Amino acid sequence: MADRRPLRRFRRITIALDSSGLNRAAVETAAMLAASTRAEFQAVFVEDEVLYTLADLPLVREVSREGTVVRSFARGDIERDLQAATAAARAAISAAARRASIEWQFEVMRGVADEMVPRMAGEAQVLALGSALARVGRVHRIESLRRSLQPGVGVLVTPPAASRTVGAVVTMLGPDADIAAMIELTRLVAGENGRERRYVVVSDEEAECDRIAAELDAAGEPEPVRCVLDDVALLARIARHLDAGLVIADIDQHAFDQVSSVERASEAFGCPLLLVQSGPGSA
């Protein structure tokens, strides 16, 4: 078996924002996670270069979602809209950090948003997705993030209409998971305020389930729920039954092959989803 690189304690939670709209539930979840893990809280607002490129084209027009409002796509309009979106994002970050009693940083960067998020996922320790991309038909593909994430790095995605953000921390464990590292991560996320920790072992092999349950017991963790099917819909139902306020899972888990994007995965669970890369790596 390949050696594993243990998950590190989070030094920084970075939340990525852009002009597609603000996911306030994601902002609050990222701030709470930064507080519970004692990590730095950083927000990065991406000014999408594609918007400026479109503004320079003479025949481009902006149409409202309802199709009733049409206006020219001028560079000046883009700059004013981005300034307003940046100010709103900064205010939301400030308010969330104040409620969580943590310090915060805010940075503005210009680039192609769809390219920068996977790049940021390769650099951050936890990258929270704070924009409302799914509402405008843009999503972050599972495969793209799988290629970008380094061992010990996570992506936090929260559905805008999350039905639960307070509750147990529920961790999914498959046969290939680094159990010790995932236990450490679960304890870290649960924080000193003692959020309940629950585990779900996902395997159709009884011996594997017994092995993982024994590791959990040796570490003083609660008896896990066992699930023989690595299926997103089934795991989501189990998470709801366990009153999950946040679900942790390995992004390489086979269940996520069934969904195309991390947004769709989090919507299935109805609560924040922390996907980590805990796979093989050098020690």
Image (cartoon, rainbow, N blue to C red):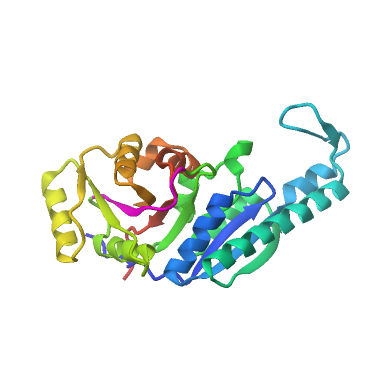
Count every numbered label the image shows and give the total: 0
The picture places residue 233, in percent across and down from the top left corner, at: 35, 35
**Residue visible at 18% across and 40% down?**
204
The picture places residue 143, in percent across and down from the top left corner, at: 46, 45
The picture places residue 213, in percent across and down from the top left corner, at: 16, 55
In the drawing, does residue 86 fall left or right of residue 124? right
In the drawing, does residue 82 fall left or right of residue 201? right
In the drawing, does residue 32 fall left or right of residue 114? left
In the drawing, does residue 54 fall left or right of residue 183? right
Q: Is residue 255 magenta?
A: no
Observer-nearest of 6 and 14 = 14
Q: Can you say whether 71 is above or below 118 in the image?
A: above
Position of the N terminus, as image quadrant, is bottom left
Quarter of the image for residue 232 reads: top left
Q: Can you say whether 12 is above or below 113 in the image?
A: below
Residue 125 appears in view:
no
**Residue visible at 27% across and 60% down?**
178
Position of the C terminus, as image quadrant, is bottom left
Q: Is residue 170 magenta?
A: yes
Observer-nearest of 59 and 241 = 241
The picture places residue 214, in percent across and down from the top left corner, at: 13, 58
Q: Can you say whether 22 is above or below 195 in the image?
A: above
**Residue visible at 73% across and 52% down?**
85
**Which segment is the magenta one?**
163-174
Residue 172 appears in view:
yes
